[in-house]
Image (spheres, grey):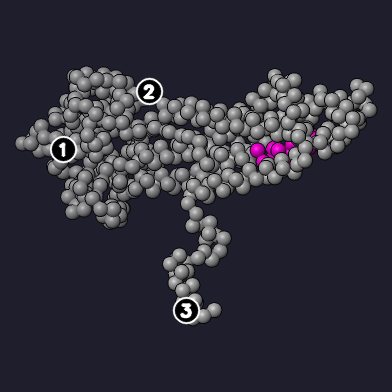
């Protein structure tokens, strides 16, 4: 090669960029969609290869169609069993993924939460997902220290403990409402201690008045706050979180209704929101903290993690929980596969019995000189047709099951769960099909070695 040609080739290679050194590099350079599609194809490849080998050189479909039509109701029963098994399996895996996304979306607005020392998981469930809990209170000095920090753009107290017809009544500030909802769906934020803003799913209307019960759930004391009625003045946008069922009132109202100070000195009576006077601040179980810059949130987390305070990122705690639940997800996937295989094994056992219905026809084919491989391909194709049809219909069952389970979980947890089938479920079904069509070779072999004379005479 001449120096000029070598120089030209080297510049061409440099223009193309660095070449992948290994198969791993080549794989990592592929788009995610291409990776998922290739994995799906690899899972399905054994079924395709077995089908090519078994059917090569023969045309078993006319006989298979006759077998499917002759015993259509029995065939439909086998297909339905496979479809239900596949549908439940893919529905569970899709639902688990949807639940993880839903819980993460519900925690998006909670950058940093500061509470008294304790369990991060417990306080996250209380402050983010509004699960009732008894928690120590943070003092006014602590609140003012946090709110007055140079990095803090929002420090919102979150005071819980009351409810109305099962909906939690939470004391906070107007700034927190706009942080959580953005612009309100209707109405306005509260301007006095007797006004409330409701979540998107609360069954009240603007102008409605109500009295909160003391406590949450079965232990709630109706009438404990008689004479202190709130009037609804606004409704938040949907957040896809338990806050859609919450009623937000001024934190001052929560303190006053329990006979405590309002958080402000007497000369500033009637004021809502910060600044608060530490001497008249009854306490709050949690404070939502937000900084404009991401790095500042980490600095605040470090500064307010100390002996008397616990600062945590709800997203990090949730990620740790998801990591712990990863083993559960794997167990669910394995259980789904095992269930599908067991159902298919039962179907294949039924196919062994069902082939006895065709034994005289298959024996007649062999007596007329049909090659043994042709008979083998007919039985295997028949079994593969049932499996493939059941698997495809199972995806449809999975879509319906996923939608139904999502609605049930959303209603139960107040977390918007939106699940749909993805590549993970398609790959699961592809692997299931490949495994079961390989197992379907067994009925074909059994049918092949049945005694011809006995079948003809029987």
Helix, strand or loop at mark 1: loop
User: Which of the 4 quarters of the picture holds residue 375?
Assistant: top right
Residue 442 drawn above or below residue 246? below
Residue on which the image places disc 3: 4
Q: Are marks 1 and 3 in contact (CB under 8 Å)?
A: no
Query: Mark 1 against mark 3, which lies toward the viewer?
Result: 3
Q: Is residue 249 visible?
A: yes
User: Which of the 4 quarters of the picture holds residue 241?
Assistant: top left
Q: Nearer the viewer, residue 449 or 262?
A: 449
Q: Nearer the viewer, residue 288 or 16?
A: 16
Query: Mark 2 against mark 1, which lies toward the viewer?
Result: 1
Magenta stretch secondary structure, dominant: helix
Q: Are marks 2 and 1 in contact (CB under 8 Å)?
A: no
Q: Which mark is residue 273?
A: 1
Residue on which the image places disc 2: 218
Q: Residue at x 26, y 23 (%)?
A: 212
């Amino acid at each position: 090669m001449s120096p000029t040609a070598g120089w030209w080739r080297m510049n061409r290679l440099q223009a193309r960029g660095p070449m992948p050194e290994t198969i791993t590099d080549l794989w990592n350079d592929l788009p995610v969609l291409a990776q998922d599609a290739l994995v799906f194809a690899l899972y399905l490849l054994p079924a395709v290869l077995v089908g090519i080998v078994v059917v090569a050189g023969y045309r078993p479909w006319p006989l298979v169609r006759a077998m499917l039509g002759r015993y259509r109701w029995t065939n439909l029963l086998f297909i339905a069993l496979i479809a239900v098994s596949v549908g439940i399996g893919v529905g569970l895996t899709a639902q688990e993924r949807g639940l993880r996304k839903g819980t993460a979306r519900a925690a998006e607005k909670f950058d940093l939460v500061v509470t008294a020392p304790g369990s991060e998981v417990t306080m996250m469930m209380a402050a983010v997902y509004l699960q009732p809990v008894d928690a120590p209170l943070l003092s006014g000095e602590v609140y003012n220290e946090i709110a007055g920090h140079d990095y803090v753009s929002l420090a919102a107290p979150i005071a819980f403990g009351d409810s109305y017809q099962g909906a939690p009544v939470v004391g906070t500030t107007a700034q927190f409402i706009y942080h959580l909802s953005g612009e309100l769906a209707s109405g306005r934020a509260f301007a006095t201690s007797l006004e409330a803003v409701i979540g998107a799913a609360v069954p009240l209307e603007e102008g409605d008045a109500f009295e909160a019960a003391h406590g949450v759930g079965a232990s709630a004391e109706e009438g404990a706050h008689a004479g202190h009625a709130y009037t609804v003045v606004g409704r938040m946008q949907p957040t896809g979180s338990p806050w859609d069922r919450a009623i937000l009132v001024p934190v001052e109202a929560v303190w006053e209704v329990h006979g405590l100070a309002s958080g402000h000195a007497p000369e500033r009576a009637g004021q809502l929101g910060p600044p608060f006077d530490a001497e008249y601040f009854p306490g709050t179980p949690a404070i939502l903290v937000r900084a404009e810059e991401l790095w500042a949130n980490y600095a605040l987390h470090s500064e307010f993690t100390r002996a008397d305070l616990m600062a945590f990122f709800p997203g990090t705690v949730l990620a740790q929980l998801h990591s712990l639940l990863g083993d559960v997800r794997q167990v669910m996937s394995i259980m789904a596969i095992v269930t599908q295989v067991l159902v298919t094994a039962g179907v294949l056992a039924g196919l062994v019995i069902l082939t006895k219905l065709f034994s005289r026809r298959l024996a007649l084919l062999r007596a007329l000189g049909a090659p043994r491989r042709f008979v083998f391909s007919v039985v295997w194709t028949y079994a593969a047709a049932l499996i493939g049809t059941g698997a495809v219909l199972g995806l449809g069952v999975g879509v319906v099951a996923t939608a139904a389970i999502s609605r049930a979980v959303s209603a139960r947890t107040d977390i918007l769960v939106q699940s749909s089938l993805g590549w993970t479920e398609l790959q699961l079904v592809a692997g299931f099909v490949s495994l079961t069509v390989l197992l379907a070779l067994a009925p074909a072999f059994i049918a092949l070695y049945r005694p011809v004379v006995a079948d003809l005479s029987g």
